[in-house]
Amino acid sequence: TTDGTVRERDADASARGTEPLLRIEDVHKSYGDEEVLRGIDLEIDRGDVEVLVGPSGSGKSTLLRCLNRLTEVDSGHIYLGDTEVTAPDTDPNAVRQQIGMVFQDINLFAHLTARKNITLGLRKVRGLSAEEARQRADSELERVGLADQADSYPAQLSGGQKQRVGIARALAMDPEVMLFDEPTSALDPELSNEVLEVMQGLVAEGMTMVVVTHEMRFARGGADEITFLADGAIVERGPPEKLFENPERERTKRFFESIR
Ligand code: ADP
Ligand code: MG
């Protein structure tokens, strides 16, 4: 079939590293009468950091959720390398291991220590032994600067520390892509900084990331591309200096002025 031919060609290109890691093709999503995503097309290269910005209600969270199948698209396709994320026979749990997500609301289990919050998924989903899971959890906690908090319960941690445990938990699955949905917007500025530093560390390691944030310092310093979304459609996309200094669209200009 034509479809098969296209997939084979894509597989070859992907093996050569010439294809984007993440491809979003004409994604539509409605809730009732409201079309929340109105034909999103986006390609993200391996190792790139894509920052999504836009007014509240523009569809940023919905788009992120479609990327790891927390929300199902109505139409369109999403690919991670050669795998079609949106294919009916693709296992959403497998997708979520490969595409980790960190939310604004820090959703740790209150009755479990930081380490146990991480080992739980490694044991259940990855089938690691208790010892393997423990080693993995501790090394991920070290990666986010929390080696000394492994035995702390969420209530004993600051908001920033909790968010870093959430990041460590996602990283423990060894994902290909990390999604961040306003990871600092519930935090005071000082606590935001420690989370942003961890995210900057991931940028430096070459992690592929899609980040919804209004932290323009992060966007300026960390983003390869910024996508400005409004009313469920991409208004403009480009490197930070272009969108900040010289946007093509009046609407983009107004948005960046409003959040400055
Ligand atoms: P953003 O993250 O940019 O603020 P969202 O993706 O959260 O935007 O929301 C886009 C629109 O979709 C909003 O109008 C929101 O109310 C609506 N929406 C989001 N999730 C749902 C849902 N589960 N059910 C109904 N409407 C939703
Ligand atoms: Mg949102």
Image: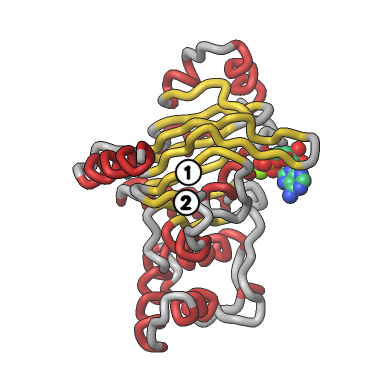
Is any part of residue 188 visible from this angle?
A: yes
- Number of residues whose C-alpha sits closer than 10 Å to that of mark 2, classed few (under 14), some (14–19) or many (20 or more): many
Q: Residue at x 61, y 70 (%)?
A: 108
Furthest toward the front, the residue is: 1
Q: Are marks 2 and 1 in contact (CB under 8 Å)?
A: yes
Label 2 or label 1, whichever comes before in sequence order: 1
The residue that disc 2 covers is 85
Q: Is residue 183 above or below residue 24?
A: below
Q: Amino acid at mark 1?
A: Ile
**Residue 231 x/y as whole percent:** 68, 27
Q: In which quadrant will I find the N terminus?
A: top left
Residue 238's mark?
none
Q: Quadrant of ligand 1?
A: top right
- Label 1: element kind: strand
Q: Amino acid at mark 2?
A: Val
Q: Residue at x 52, y 61 (%)?
A: 92
Q: Residue at x 41, y 25 (%)?
A: 239
The residue that disc 1 covers is 78
Furthest toward the bottom, the residue is: 130
